[in-house]
Image (cartoon, rainbow, N blue to C red):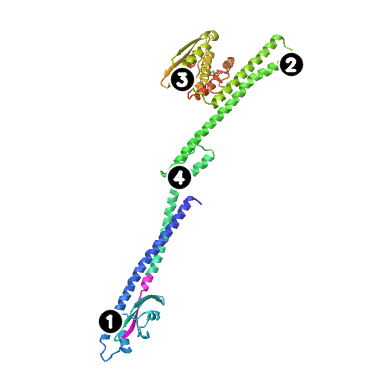
Amino acid sequence: MKISFKLLLSTIVVMALALGFSGFYFVNYVFETSLKREIGQASDESSVLRFAFETAVLNVPARYSVLPDTTVEEIASNLERGGRSTSRLIRIADERKEVLHTSDGFAADERLLQQTEPDAKSYRIIETQGSYYVHTCAAINALGRILYLETMKDVSEVFTERAMGFSLYRKVTLLMLLVGTVIMHFIAALLTKPIRLLTRATRRMAGGDYAYRARQVSRDELGQLTCDFNRMANALEENIAILEEENEAKEEFMGAFAHELKTPLTAIIGYADMLRSHRLDEEKSFLSANYIYTEGKRLEAMSFRLLDIIVAKKGEAELSEVQTAVFFAYLKEMFTEENRGMQFVFSCEDGSVWAEENLIKTVLVNLIDNACKASEPGSTVRVRGMWVEEGYRFEVEDEGIGIPLKEQRKITKAFYMVDKSRSRSKNGAGLGLALCAEILRIHNSELTIQSEPGCGSCFGFVLGE
Ligand code: ADP
């Protein structure tokens, strides 16, 4: 069942109960008040008649020591008509409760008469021939006799009013329920609109439309829910985009990896086949075996690099305080004009950084190696270390071929080479900068590249002190 329908149904039930009970209570209250008033009037009338009877008895001639029945009847019929257009309904009974006089139309039975004590007054509500009456009974003390006077007062109007009240209230209740249902239908539709919009958004997203968002139409809890849902959808969309990107990167990596394996393997297989199927002279045999050895070495170096990247990706750096001079001493020893045919200028500000020494050495060696590969023999490579606002900055600057701007974003991807044949000829496989990026990531740092084709490049990164 729809929530708007549940809301509508529960409101109708509550409204029906509230209107029903309040209506019943109100009409009944009016009825009881009117009936009480009528009973009071009937009782007053009974007292007045009793008094009138007793006064009339005082005028009975003194020769009677006991009031005769005929006089009682006479007084009763006088009282019946006394000063009114319609005759009263009365009944007089003697001390043995035998009826002496009954008005025409007095239809009450004698139950009340039998129950009434000589010193008491009583009443009850009776219904005869579709009309309601207040039936009263009271004793009269007349000339040594105890007589009983009964009256009947018509109160049918009060009962008719109650029936009309109930009927009117039923109609009003029905009308109010009808109007209430229509109004509540719109209110329920309005209140549940955010839920409908959320449902639509959920379905659209489940169908793959991750950019779809639910419209926020209120500022209440449901509005907050919509807002939170949209925030969740944003996070989901971002994560999906990241996953897609990662998946794409993985596929790219696999493709590049397969390609990088294929070229040396084809050569190795070719030379090995030649060695086993032809009788080659000594020189050719050496060249073939040497080719197999060099390509094998290249594959081995590549697999070590890949392993290093995987380890760096998964691992964490074991940081310790390292003097910056330690790095420069190591680099100065490793890169000399004699062994590289290049000019190296090292400048280092003193201090210490938090780093895993060997990993940062790997980064610096890779960067200087790349600078050498990109430069003409004899040109200068500058390696600097300086304090900046964020920490200690290492820079490797060359005067080499440079890197076009659109390539700069890609060169840290595994197997990416700007000029494949040039890189391969220099024993590159496009893994060095990918490894550097991973190492710097676990040091909470990143590689910055400033480069212009033909003018050289400057690679740098900052470490915390
Ligand atoms: P490689 O093993 O090929 O050197 P890297 O990941 O270290 O792999 O470098 C990726 C590519 O970035 C290189 O193939 C090269 O094209 C480019 N590159 C890296 N450093 C420099 C540099 N200093 N100057 C110009 N190009 C560079």
Name of the residue lying farthest toward the bottom? 63
Q: CA distance from mark 2 to mark 1?
A: 154 Å
Quick one: 355 or 286, which is closer to the camera?
Answer: 355
* Number of the label disc, if any, that sits on residue 52: 1
* Number of the label disc, if any, that sits on residue 194: 4
Q: Residue at x 26, y 92 (%)?
A: 63
Q: CA distance from mark 2 to mark 3?
A: 58 Å
User: Label 3: how many residues lie within 10 Å, few (<14), some (14-19) or many (20+)?
Assistant: some
The span shown in magenta is 145-160
| Whether label 4 touches label 2, CB < 8 Å | no
| Whether label 1 touches label 4, CB < 8 Å | no
**SS at circle 1:** helix
- The three-letter amino acid code for the residue at tag 2 is Ser
| Whether label 3 touches label 4, CB < 8 Å | no
- The three-letter amino acid code for the residue at tag 4 is Pro
Which residue matches tag 2? 277
Q: CA distance from mark 4 to mark 2?
A: 78 Å
Q: Is residue 25 magenta?
A: no
- Tell me residue 368's x, y (percent): 51, 15
- Tell me residue 292's x, y (percent): 66, 16
**SS at circle 2:** helix
Quick one: 281 or 53, which is closer to the camera?
Answer: 53
- Circle 3 or circle 1, nearest the eye: 3
- Circle 2 or circle 1, nearest the eye: 1
Precedes in sequence: disc 3 or disc 4:
4
Q: Is residue 397 visible?
A: no
- The three-letter amino acid code for the residue at tag 3 is Val
Quick one: 222 or 52, which is closer to the camera?
Answer: 52
Which residue matches tag 3? 353
| Whether label 3 touches label 1, CB < 8 Å | no
